[in-house]
């Protein structure tokens, strides 16, 4: 089992490394950081621009391979991801923002997985009953809506609710109320309140996808002989379904989880942008808008590491559920 | 159940069993069509999608306003008999704009879905059929694109595509929409590769491309048709998300994404600017995915997750 997980981890690690490096090369070929200075008035001289860009290590005149090599050497020897175009450390910017994104991602993903699995199992057990039909059509509808539509519709609903109640029950702009005084308890509730809508948006999208997969995985399992065997040896229906059904149906889900995580990351980035959170999603989009190669690569590295963790976690779950890989 | 069915064959004393003759032998496509016809989801999807396409084609005819017209006497008015979906703050008719945006989104979706499936079929079949180093390289490339969220790549590539026309966006979306299906096709091809009919073709000296075109692609065509149908909705979602953040369709052109982006600011105070286009968008994608899902169930009733 350890061997299996280590092998998968190395596979994901190599994949993440290659993804990051190719993101660097791709960004270096497409983005032109020099263009940012041409519009200035008075326009800086070419030598000035060149020395600024050389200092950042993003001068387009240097061959991409050489820049990539310097970037890697810098990362390995100094543990640094270079500077942003505003001369701040990329790593420092990222540590400031990562917490914001991770809070949304971790809570959202956990709720999505739990709700999705529960709805999927329910739908499979009550196949073609009313509740299954309602869950199916609801998840189809959620899957058919882009992330930003879900976010904005939730905002409209929250505003109407606030208007109906006459108080600001749910606040949703930004990550916390600016200039709020109070002890950590007040601050905590303020942040929790702001977290509510984005988390619901992310969890809804995730749960809709997971429930579809869990339902069809569960349906495959329900017709299997071992469920009947478990029933005939005296297990109750619920116990047979949980011990033998859900457990087996979760195995393909763990693979799906790893594959869908990139989609979750994109959805989280869109959700952050819609709710104007200053997280990694905004960081990545701003990096592209400002032609900031180092910042973009840093953001992609962050995503690659998250996918590495999610992939390894799903393999651990896989190995824990499926005795065949534990040899 | 299975034991009961085996009884007549096992027992010779039963005499000749009655042979059921139908008018035509049940072919695979007839079976799939029969299953499809029994799926209510398929009918909901196909009728809905058909109505939306018809509406996109002819919906402007009964409307008094064109999408470029500005009604300066009714700026920011709510839905009324004059302006069915209301007007924007400079007097644009939202109904006309929604239809024009829907047309563009539909064209993009209907082109990108099949294009991505064709790429998926060819790449997946090549990887599965050639095997060896080619397979390794292609699979690594696919995995790489799955690790890098394609939304981020679209945004990165958008400076290039902004300067080109919206047609370039179609190729961009198709170029990144084929990976998952390519893996599925590859797995199918690997099991097909060792079947007798493909071996026979290979030993007769038929070239790789001909074998893929004549023997492998027809055998995975049901998968590709499903993927093309599901891809329509996925492409519309990608396009609207990109356009919403200003990375997709650019200003003289209108799509549902740019329309939603324009209506976003007033979504709370003047909801018709946002809710009508959003509802049309969700319905379009929903109907397309219902058709795709019903197709998948009809082609492979035991389908679901274990196909990779």
Image (cartoon, rainbow, N blue to C red):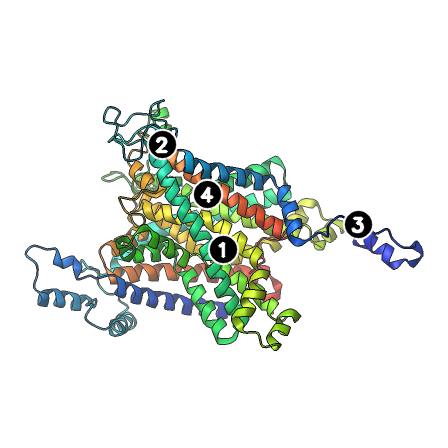
On screen, residue A57 versus residue B100, left or right, reads left
Of tags 3 and 4, the one toward the viewer is: 3
Please give the label number shown on residue B91: none
On screen, residue A163 versus residue A205, left or right, reads left
Please give the label number shown on residue B21: 3
- What separation in Å lies between label 1 and label 3 (alpha carbons)? 48 Å
| Mark 2 chain | B
Of tags 4 and 2, the one toward the viewer is: 2
Q: Quadrant of the C terminus of chain A?
A: bottom right
Q: Identify the residue position indicated by label 1 in the image.
A: A257
Q: Pointer 1: residues within 10 angstroms few (<14), some, or many (20+)?
A: many
Provide residue A133's location: percent of width, then percent of height. Answer: 58, 38
Residue B34 seen in render: yes
Q: Identify the residue position indicated by label 2 in the image.
A: B95
Let me know if marks 1 and 4 both belong to one chain: no
Quadrant of residue A54 in the image? bottom left
- What separation in Å lies between label 3 and label 4 (alpha carbons)? 42 Å
| Mark 1 chain | A
Question: Residue at point 86% right, 51% down?
Answer: B18
Q: Identify the residue position indicated by label 4 in the image.
A: B285
Question: Residue at point 57% right, 65% down?
Answer: B214
Let me know if marks 4 and 2 both belong to one chain: yes
Q: Pointer 4: residues within 10 angstroms few (<14), some, or many (20+)?
A: many
Question: Residue at point 41% right, 51% down?
Answer: A106
Q: Considering only order in the chain, which callout, 2 or 4, is on the residue closer to the N terminus? A: 2
The vertical placement of A165 against B302, above or below, is above
């Amino acid at each position: 089992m350890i061997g299996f997980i280590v092998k998968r981890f190395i596979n994901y690690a190599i994949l993440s490394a290659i993804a990051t490096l190719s993101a660097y090369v791709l960004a270096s070929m497409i983005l032109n950081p020099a263009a940012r200075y041409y519009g200035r008035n008075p326009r800086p001289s070419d030598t000035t621009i060149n020395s600024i860009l050389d200092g950042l290590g993003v001068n387009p005149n240097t061959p991409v391979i050489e820049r990539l090599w310097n970037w890697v050497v810098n990362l390995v020897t100094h543990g640094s991801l270079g500077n942003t175009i505003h001369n701040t450390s990329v790593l420092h910017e990222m540590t400031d923002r990562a917490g914001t994104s991770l809070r949304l991602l971790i809570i959202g993903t956990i709720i999505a997985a739990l709700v999705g699995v529960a709805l999927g199992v329910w739908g499979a057990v009550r196949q073609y009953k009313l509740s299954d039909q309602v869950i199916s059509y609801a998840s189809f509808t959620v899957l058919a809506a882009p992330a930003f539509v879900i976010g904005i519709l939730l905002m409209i609903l929250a505003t109407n609710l606030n208007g109906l109640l006459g108080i600001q029950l749910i606040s949703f702009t930004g990550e916390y109320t600016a200039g709020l005084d109070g002890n950590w308890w007040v601050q905590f509730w303020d942040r929790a309140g702001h977290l509510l809508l984005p988390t619901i948006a992310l969890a809804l999208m995730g749960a809709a996808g997971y429930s579809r997969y869990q339902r069809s995985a569960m349906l495959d399992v329900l017709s299997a002989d071992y469920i009947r065997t478990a029933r005939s040896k005296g297990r109750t229906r619920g116990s047979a379904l949980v011990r033998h059904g859900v457990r087996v149906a979760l195995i393909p889900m763990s693979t799906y989880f790893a594959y869908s995580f990139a989609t979750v990351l994109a959805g989280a980035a869109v959700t952050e942008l819609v709710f104007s959170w200053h997280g990694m999603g905004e960081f990545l989009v701003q990096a592209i808008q400002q032609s900031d190669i180092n910042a973009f690569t840093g953001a992609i590295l962050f995503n690659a590491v998250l996918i590495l963790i999610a992939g390894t976690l799903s393999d651990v779950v896989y190995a824990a559920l499926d005795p065949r890989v534990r040899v | 159940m299975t034991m009961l069915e085996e009884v007549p064959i096992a027992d010779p004393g039963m005499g000749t069993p009655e042979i059921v003759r139908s008018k035509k032998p049940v072919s695979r496509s007839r079976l799939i069509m029969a299953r499809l016809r029994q799926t209510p989801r398929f009918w909901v999807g196909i009728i809905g999608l058909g109505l939306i396409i018809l509406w996109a084609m002819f919906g402007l005819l009964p409307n008094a306003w064109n999408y470029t017209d500005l009604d300066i006497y009714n700026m920011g008015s709510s839905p009324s008999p004059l302006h069915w979906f209301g007007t924007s703050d400079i007097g644009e008719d939202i109904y006309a704009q929604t239809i024009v945006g829907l047309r563009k989104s539909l064209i993009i979706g209907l082109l990108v879905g099949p294009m991505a499936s064709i790429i998926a079929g060819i790449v997946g079949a090549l990887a599965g059929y050639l095997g060896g180093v080619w397979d390794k390289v292609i699979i690594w490339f696919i995995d790489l694109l799955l690790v890098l969220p394609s939304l981020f790549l679209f945004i990165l590539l958008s400076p290039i595509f902004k300067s080109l026309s919206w047609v370039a966006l179609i190729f961009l979306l198709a170029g990144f929409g084929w990976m998952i299906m390519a893996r599925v096709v590859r797995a199918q091809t690997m099991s097909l590769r060792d079947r007798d009919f493909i071996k026979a073709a290979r030993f007769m000296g038929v070239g790789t491309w001909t074998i893929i075109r004549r023997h492998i692609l027809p055998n995975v065509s049901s998968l590709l048709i499903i993927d093309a149908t599901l891809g329509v909705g996925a492409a519309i979602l990608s396009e609207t998300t990109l356009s919403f953040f200003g990375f997709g369709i650019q200003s003289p052109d209108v799509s549902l994404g740019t329309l939603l982006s324009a209506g976003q600011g007033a979504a709370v105070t003047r909801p018709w600017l946002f809710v009508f286009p959003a509802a049309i968008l969700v319905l379009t994608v929903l109907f397309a995915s219902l058709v795709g899902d019903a197709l998948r169930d009809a082609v492979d009733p035991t389908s679901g997750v274990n196909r990779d």
